[in-house]
Each structure stands twice: as C-alpha cells, then as structure tokens.
Amino acid sequence: MKIQDLLIKDAMIMDLKATTKEAAIDEMIDRYAQVGVITDKADYKTHIMQREAESTTGIGDGIAMPHAKTDSVKKAAVLFAKSNAGVDFNALDGQPVHLFFMIAAPAGANNEHLQALAALSSLLINPALVASLKKADTPDQVISLFNDAEAKKEAEDAKDEQEAAATQAAVGTADAAKSAEPAADIKKPYVVAVTACPTGIAHTYMAEAALKQEAKKMGVDIKVETNGSEGIKHRLTASDIDRAVGVIVAADKKVAMDRFSGKHLINRPVIDGINKPHQLIEDTLAERGPIFHASGDDSAADAGTDDEDKQSLGRQIYASLMNGISNMLPFVVGGGIIMALSFLLERLPGVGANSIVFTFTNSLGNAAFNFLVPVLAAYIAEAIGDRPALLPGFVAGWMANNTGFSIIASKNGVAGFLGGLVGGFLAGLTILVLKRWFKNLPKALDGLKPVFIFPILSLLAIGLMMYFIINPVFTALNLALIGFLESMGTTNTILVGTILGGMMAIDMGGPFNKAAYVFSIGVFMSSKQTDGRWMAAVMAGGMVPPLAIALATTIWPKKWTPAERTSGLSDYLLGLSFITEGAIPFAAADPLRIITSSIIGAAIAGGLTQAMGVNVPAPHGGIFASLLANKPLQFLLAVVIGSVISGVILGLWKKNRPDNGLDEVKA
C-alpha cells in the first residue's frame, strides 16, 4: 500500500479555520466523519485527547500528528490539513503548527496499513518536503509531493540496503580470514538503536528516520530496531550489538534490555530520537552513556539513563506507586462489586446470611480482596526492581495483611494497606541492592542470580524487615488511626470528607485523586471492610466531574461542539459508574473551567456525605455500590447536589462556541 492510498483528497483541509487546539481537532474530526472514515466522532475524539494528555503530538517545526487507533475508525487514513495563520497546539518547540496529519487507524489495522503509516511518518523529518507542503495550495499538489518524496526515499533505502549487505559481507570475510586490517567500510563507526512509542504509529518511525538520516550525514553506520504497531522490525542480532560502539534506546515504553548488557547505553524519550538525533549519536560515539548491566530477566530497565535524564525521586516514587495501584484496581473492582452483590443478595427474601448464594458470592469477593495488598506491594516492587522483585513484594504484602507475622503479637490489627505499601518499596529496593552487590559476579554464574541468589536473599531480607520493623510499627499506627477516626467530632469529619472529595477532582486519576483513594481504602481495609465513611466521600467526589460535564453539555448545548455534546452523553454513564477519567478529555481542552468547577462540586459532595453520616461498604461501583450504603438516598442526594453546583458553575462560566453546529448561534 502506498502513502497516497491513505491520503484522501476529499478529506484534506487546505485552509484550516480553527485557531485553538481543540477547535482544530474538532474541525478535522468533522471532516473525517463527512467522508466516512469514522463512525463515532465522540469515541475517536476521546482517543485523540487521551493521546494528547500523554504528551503533545505537536512535534515542532510547524507539524502536528494527532493520532488514534480505535474501533470507531472504518479504514486507515491520514487527513492532511494546513493552517495559514498557525494554531497554538502546545508543540514541543512552542511554535504555531501549520501542517496537520491526523492519523486514523482501525483497532485491527493490517500490516499494509501500518507500514504505509510508518512510511508517511518517516517522510516528515525531511525539511524539503515540509517546506514544500507549507506552500501547497491544492490536494493534488500535496499528493504529488508525497509521491515524489516516497519514490526518492525508496531509491535511497534500496541503495542503503545494498551498502549494508556489502558491509555485512565484508565483516564476514574479515572474520573468516581473521584479517588484522578490516575492509574500508568496516572502519566506519557503528551504533545500534531501538525506537518505540506507546501507540507505535508515528513517533516510532519518525525517530527511526531521523536517526538514520543524521547517521548518514555524520558518516556513521546505524541499525535501528522499531517496536511499533506492526511488531518488531529490523530486530537487532547478537552480532549487531556486539559490533556496535554503543546503544541508543529512544522509547516511551518497555523494550527488551538485557541483550545490551556490557554496552554503553543512552536511554531517552522517543521525542529525543526525532529532535536530537545528532546529540544521541555523538554521545554514543563518545561512550558517554553508562555501561548497562542486565538484571537477568530480559525486561526493560531504567538503568542506562544518564544523570541529566534520571527521574526525580518524587517522580520515581509516584510512578512505582501508580504501577502498584493500577495492577491492584481489577481486584478492587472485581472483589468489591462481587462482595457488594453478596450483601444485596443477603437482603432478598428467602436468602439470608446462611444461604449458599450469599456464602459463595461473599467468599469469592473476599478472596479477591485478600489479594489487594499483596498485589499492590508486588507491583510497586516490580516497578523498582523488575521481575525479580515480584517474589519479595508479594510476600511483603501477604505478611502485612495477616496476623502472626510480627514480633509484637496483635489479634486486633495488621500492618495492612500502609504496611504493604512500604513493604513493596522495601522489596524493590532490596533487589536493587542485591543487583549492585552481585553485578561483578563471574559470567558463568550469572544465571544463578534470578533463580537462586535473588529469590533466597530477598525473601530472607524482606521477611526480617516485615517481622521485626514494618508490621509492628504499622499495626500500631493503624490501630491508632482507627481510634482517632472513631473519636472525631462531626465538624472534623465533614472537613476531611470535603478535602477528600475535592482531591478526587483535582487531577481526575492522577496523584491527588489516587492519594485520596489510597487513604480511604486503607481505612476501609484496616476496619475489616466496615468503615466506609471515607469511601463514601471519595466515591461521591469522583462521580461529580463527569456528571457535571454531562449536565452542562445538555443544558447549555450552544457552549459545546457537536462532538463534545456527544461525548458528554457518555459521561452520564461514566459518572454514575465512578469513572472520574471520563472528564479528562474535557479537562485537557479547558483545564481552568473544568477543574475549578469540578473541585467545588466534588468537595461539596464529599462533605455532604459526612454531614449526613453516609457509610458505603464497597470500594468501587458508583451508583451500584450506593445501594449498599446505610443511607443510599442521602448518598445520591450528595452526588446530585455536588454535580448540579459544579455543572451550573461550568455552564455559566463557559462561553458560546461559534462552531457548535446549532442554528442561530449568538456570539
């Protein structure tokens, strides 16, 4: 498949009217819908905005490549749009964007489509093509420019392949003859690289092309492995890696790293592969990257990143915590909902607490719940120490969640959620220490580390720490916390509920949101699933943002685009289900209004649950879990009041949109 097969003439916009990022996205999505590329504008926009929330697709030099891969795309396509005035798209270089390439890929895109998308992406690092596209006036000119650029690149690639084959043959001849003086081609410095991005559609291949183009200018041989949507291409062999001066990993997702053990390695974000190829190659040739030491588990590692690119301590802690929480959430949702269902069934006539129906569902929910702390601890540890840290992490979580694993006997409490959380960090750090201690182990004994040395020593170390330090300290802390909460007066309870509710709306799934949720679920578990006061506050607060947006898009339709109104309808269901993330696409487009109004309404809802004494004995479920509350009507009233207040603030604050698609729109 050729690039021109993806560039639809009827979809091109040669004079984009939008002046803001969201308006530009909406204008392009509308055109896609008009030509029949997408079936659901709201769904496609949600995926586009989620990608933009990860990092801007405005790559600099006046180019943006918003892209999404979803079931709402009927066929793979690329929409070309040109803005003469330029659009502030939060580009990496801070400059306005003039050329847009909106990529639409079906969820099941075949290799032909993906290869064509990759080819198009790689062409866009050609400055001559970009300059010509900025001057193009018609769709025919755009297609002609791409045809010429593609033909030229194919010819260059064929020539490069011939040269690479000749070089490889020379290497083989030199090895066979054991010549002291290698062939002339072999004298060129040689580096290897890996490029990868989360979606694997655009940035992966742009980084590949930029590195190869810059290496050619510098007189350097390079081989680039791509980890994209169509799988791994140009896979690096052991001989490639052995021959290379060093390794460049330009990736925003995990790639296999252990194969690079012993090589100088530079690990950077994929965007650096696009924008800083000269620096990456120059640093690799100068061996400025630290020598990478394999962990023995063939997973991606953080090692190899030079000091200027290392994450801050706070960022590392947050990333590790999020890894634990994201892996724990399925157990929270599955176990919590099944447990909630058991309580509902118990209330049915003829069922009761002794029935097999109640016993089965309640036991099943509790079984899943018993994994919460071990899974949290294990995956916090895994984020720090990779796969070898799973064993001590799981054990630390299990010890924290069960009595009898402490030097101070206690039948009334366990270290619980907080103890498991700390145990997870200690388990990961233990593996890092062991890796450092045994990094100089003879190669012949390297295989003993992951299967013998790490499991035994890490298990012994974490067991001692949990038994003698963590469990005694956090068991006492949990008992004190529960006692303090039970003694709190009404005013203090309302204040805490207000704060927790507001935190749920600050970043809608980010660190503030997760901190409030972690606190409430920690209290909930420490009380043996009985104290759900704070669950009520965070659940009500988390339901408000999407519900408020849904109300505002319904009551004030002229203030939203057609795509936003459609997306707003889905927020009713997301809000009722306690999925705060449904508000993220709106918050990304209009953070000041959306976040401010959401915090106000969520804080009010959280405070009201405490003022009315609501207790929700389930950690998830939204409106469905509210049926289990001691005061379900009061819980729903708190959510409704918070959502209405937030929705009204948002609706009155937001201005009418000229592109709302409705008749007789007033300015």
Image (spheres, rainbow, N blue to C red):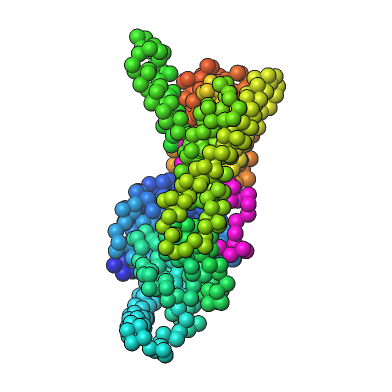
Q: Is residue 224 rendered magenta in the image? A: no
- Residue at x 45%, y 78% (from the top left corner): 190
Per the picture, the main secondary structure of the magenta-coloured stretch is helix
- Residue at x 41%, y 85% (from the top left corner): 186
Where residue 236 appears, as percent x and y from the top left, is 38, 69
Name above or below for residue 57 compared with residue 461: below
**Residue 502 visible at all:** yes
Most distant residue in the top direction: 350
Quadrant in the rendering for residue 158: bottom left
Tell whether 289 sits left or right of 31: right
Q: Give the camera-side residue of 585 and 377.
A: 377
Report the magenta residues as a range. 305-329
Total marks drawn?
A: 0
Name above or below for residue 540 compared with residue 306: above
- Residue at x 53%, y 77% (from the top left corner): 285
- Residue at x 62%, y 63% (from the top left corner): 307
Where residue 605 appears, as percent x and y from the top left, is 60, 28
Q: Give the camera-side residue of 567 and 116.
A: 116
Name above or below for residue 323 compared with residue 236: above
Tell whether 551 sits left or right of 315: left
